[in-house]
Image: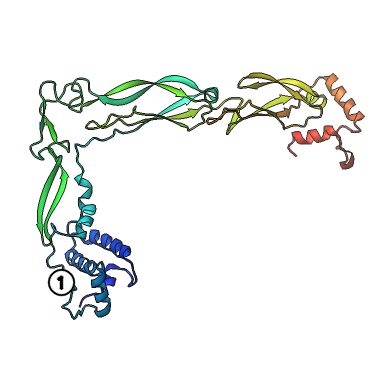
Amino acid sequence: MKRDYYEVLGVSKDADTEEIKKAYRKLARKYHPDVNKEADAEAKFKEVKEAYDVLSDSQARAQYDRFGHQDPNQGFGGGGFGGFDANNMGGFGDIFDMFFGGGRRANPNAPRKGSDLQFGLSIDFTEAVFGKETDVEIPKEAECDTCHGSGAKPGSGVETCHTCKGTGQQEVAANTPFGRIVNRRVCPTCEGKGKVVKEKCTSCKGAGRVKIRRKIHLNIPAGVDDGAQLRVSGEGEPGFNGGPPGDLYVVLRVKAHEFFEREGNDIYCEVPITFAQAALGDEIEVPTVDGRVKLKIPAGTQSETFFRLRGKGVPFLRGNGRGDQHVKARVVTPKKLTDRQKELLREFAELSGESPGHPASEDNESFFERMKRAFRGE
């Protein structure tokens, strides 16, 4: 007894044409005798094809939905499969090519682009900020100068492969219950090249390519960041059969700086100041990527206060202008004091209404005590 065609394909009765086609492709690949060597694979493949022949045809499907397998007009179920011919497969031919041979029909002697190359380059922090021009040596393949890429010894020439007649593919025919099926594979004689070298070039050993180190000039733009890629067109591996070369991608690795840190186009740094500078104010020198600049510290500056130096950051890659530099002032507590310094601090504490060793009250907390708590991270 025949199974329901919808059940065979694993689709619902309201499935559209695309769903039926997808289900058929999946099952055809699964049960095709050239792929599946199980004993019942051939029968299942035939059943799937029969179901698809009916359900993919709107008129035949409507007839099947009405009468089932008992078609009063002489049953179409299975009637079309007996005449299956691999050389006249209609819609199935396209699917068969897709699964078992479609991709192998490309001309192996057609021009093909060469492979892309990737190269890592380390640069300093300031080089990333301002950019630089430099030369790098890239290991790569190049066309052999001796044989000009043919792989043949000069004077010996190249012959058309006698096995594949220059196509680079070999056809293997097989008779199956479904007809005569032709598979295509890479020619083993010429390895898909379509040509045979009788005497190999001594410089490249018949490969047509040699390893070289090529010097390439790079122009690194100002403002690049870690991980940025520079594309150098045409500096990859050479193409095949006259195809264009690939491209070179230079991946930049920016070294960390001992003083500056970067976030986007802004630069951050930290400068130490003394308690006296924080309390009384001062003008200090701050390093920037452009050199030292003056920075005014106002009286009463708290530890970890940020100051902005506009336009002292990293240039924008696209457009004009630069980011800013953010300077964090950190008040440094001296670790060693002279007797005189201790005496003055005690006097300061007394004038501030503090008793050394006793914290100030919450409603009369001194500036000095707040600073000491800030030092402790409280």
Q: Residue at x 11, y 49 (%)?
A: 172
Q: Position of residue 153 (x, y in %)?
A: 13, 22
Q: Residue at x 20, y 23 (%)?
A: 148
Q: Position of residue 20 (x, y in %)?
A: 29, 65
**Which quadrant holds the N terminus?**
bottom left
Left or right: residue 23 compared with residue 132: left
Could you say which is closer to the camera, residue 15 or residue 10? 15
Q: Which residue is mark 1?
A: 79
**Which quadrant holds the C terminus?**
top right
Could you say which is closer to the camera, residue 255 or residue 297? 297
Could you say which is closer to the camera, residue 60 or residue 216? 60
Three-letter code for the amino acid on which mark 1 is drawn: Gly
Left or right: residue 134 compared with residue 272: left
Q: Position of residue 371 (x, y in %)?
A: 79, 33
Q: Residue at x 32, y 64 (%)?
A: 19
**For the image shown, how many numbered marks are present on the structure?**
1
Q: Position of residue 226 (x, y in %)?
A: 50, 31
The furthest residue to the front: 59
Label 1 sits on a secondary structure element that is loop
| Residue 64: quarter of image | bottom left
31 is higher (above) or lower (below) than 255: below
